[in-house]
Amino acid sequence: MPMHNAEIADAFEDLADLLEVEDANPFRVRAYRNAARVIRSNRRRIADLAAEDLTDLPEVGEDLAQKIRALVETGELPALEEVRKRVPQSISEMMRIEGLGAKKVKALYEGLGVKGLEDLKQAAEEGRVAELEGFGEKTQEMILERAADAAEKEQRSLRNDAEDVAEPLLAYLEAIDGVKQVELAGSYRRRKETVGDLDILVTAERGTPVMQRFVDYDEVAEVASRGDTRSTVHLRSGMQVDLRLLPQVSFGAALHYFTGSKAHNVAVRKLGRKRGYKLNEYGVFEGDQRIAGRTEEDVFASLDLPYIPPDLRENRGEIEAAREDRLPDMVRLGDIRGDLHCHTRYTDGHAGLRAMAEAARELGREYLAITDHTQNLKVVNGLDAKRLRRQMAEIDRLNDELEGITLLKGAEVDILEDGDLDLPDDVLQALDLTVCSLHSKFDLPRNQQTERVLRALDHPAFRILGHPTGRRLNQRPPLALDLEKVMRAAAERGRFLEVSAQPDRLDLNDEACLLARELGVQVAISTDAHTAADLDLMRYGLEQARRGWLEKKHVINTRTLKQLQKLLQN
């Protein structure tokens, strides 16, 4: 089977990690990280493109293209195998812990012989980390806390990585003669930001060899169990998949049961018991008689409830809302008119202004905000006032030429430690909008971090708080930030918060989206695109917003351009 994009990206991430520990050329390390990002976010399967000119991909030159081909064709990346002879592969596990950069990981490896998470936890528990020069008790406590979190999070896949594995398997099962229905259930169907195991439900004609074909799937690495109605396998990616073969009469009940969440199911069963019903994966029963179960709609109708979308099934009030006919009319992809956060070659993006504009127009966007980084972020050549004004002039010229799309003049402005913004007021006021973000000093205490953001919110040029908690899924925890206090201040000042559609951010999370709705804070769902292909990531942000009960009226980039401009001016 061809390699998944996630597998290719992981190999280049590992290579970058290990080279960074070796103090390799930082530009070389950055090139591998950029390649991993481009590959992971690409909607096309890179392995299928290996025979083509891979240098058409952003940030992929001929040397990287040759490495990708070698990896796809042989399953190995020679450069990675070479560095693994010098640095243990397990060291890259420690790079996933926030606060442990390459220098500290190298010090732990060389000073204590720590080669992975288990070694690290043991060294911290024994107090040896605090004794190492440059560490101390505080760092040791942080390691103990975050190493445990890192080990747990590694078991869950980012949603886009899970899709890369799940969708081909779903298509494979649907193609089996005799199969009638195939549905993914569990957290995947509820559109959670990370996915553990995959739960697949199937109905088929009698005698269809579903289970045999399932365990024969090319990507199966291990068959944990095989039965007539249920089998469990582990895929090459490490993901566990459970397949259940069901009678048609129970399919809806089973789909509801295995979609979850557990808390939602408990609440629904409790509602059923009040009516004298028994609900399980086989149906809704009154005594021995099955009264519903063929479809999910039938299950809900038996309780006098309308259909509750899977996105909402977390027992956060959806059952009460359904009973009172006040389920949210959740925002849809077709409601999105523009994208308010993207980067170009001016800083760390991989496409020019025109290419980004044309790609956004192809996706049906009416406007696109160009928000390159500003001067404080020197590692990506952030824009100073002079270069930003040059970009603004180029945007004006392009808008005179472009049809069907308008570029907005923006910037992703750094919030400094004291809460100031990192560009002069006169240039900030000349922009159409600002996305103001935290890119440094992540370890400030909660009160100080919160005050930092509150002060930034007071700046007259502040518009949108970018990826508000600074988290990266499976890599970096959220900042210590009083998010409710920040949201209340944003509501008072007419500021907005971003829901980043980047699959490794999805920041705000779903619970924070729900809080924003309750506090009257509007959001911008934006892609933070660094390539033209990234503009198509919008749907991940939509899924996050929907899980947070957000409707069209809560999202500022569902407005027309004139409506948005008025909103931003106010």
Image: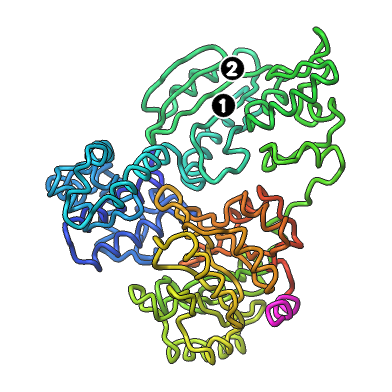
> In this rendering, is residue 451 above or below 184?
below
Asked if residue 505 is among those painted magenta in the image, a careful observer would answer no
Residue beneath the point at 49% across and 28% down: 241
Q: Disc 1 vs disc 2: Cβ atoms closer than 8 Å?
A: yes
User: In 3D space, how far apart are the residues under numbered discs 1 and 2 (Cα atoms)?
Assistant: 8 Å
Label 2: which secondary element:
loop
The residue under label 1 is which amino acid type?
Ile
Q: Residue at x 22, y 52 (%)?
A: 105
Q: Which residues are magenta?
A: 561-570
Coloration mode: rainbow
Q: Amino acid at mark 2?
A: Thr
Residues 63 and 20: in front is 20
Q: Is residue 442 left or right of residue 401?
A: left
Identify residue for label 1. Answer: 176
Say which residue appears at 52% left-offset and 24% top-offset: 242
Residue 249 seen by the camera? no
Residue at the spot x=44%, y=50% of the render? Answer: 45
The spot of residue 25 in percent (x, y) is 19, 66
Pointer 2 residue? 208
Residue 489 image-quadrant placement = bottom right
Q: Is residue 431 left or right of residue 235?
A: right
Image coordinates for residue 229, horizontal then vertical, percent? 57, 14
Quadrant of the rendering where the C terminus is positioned: bottom right
Residue 565: x and y in percent read 70, 80
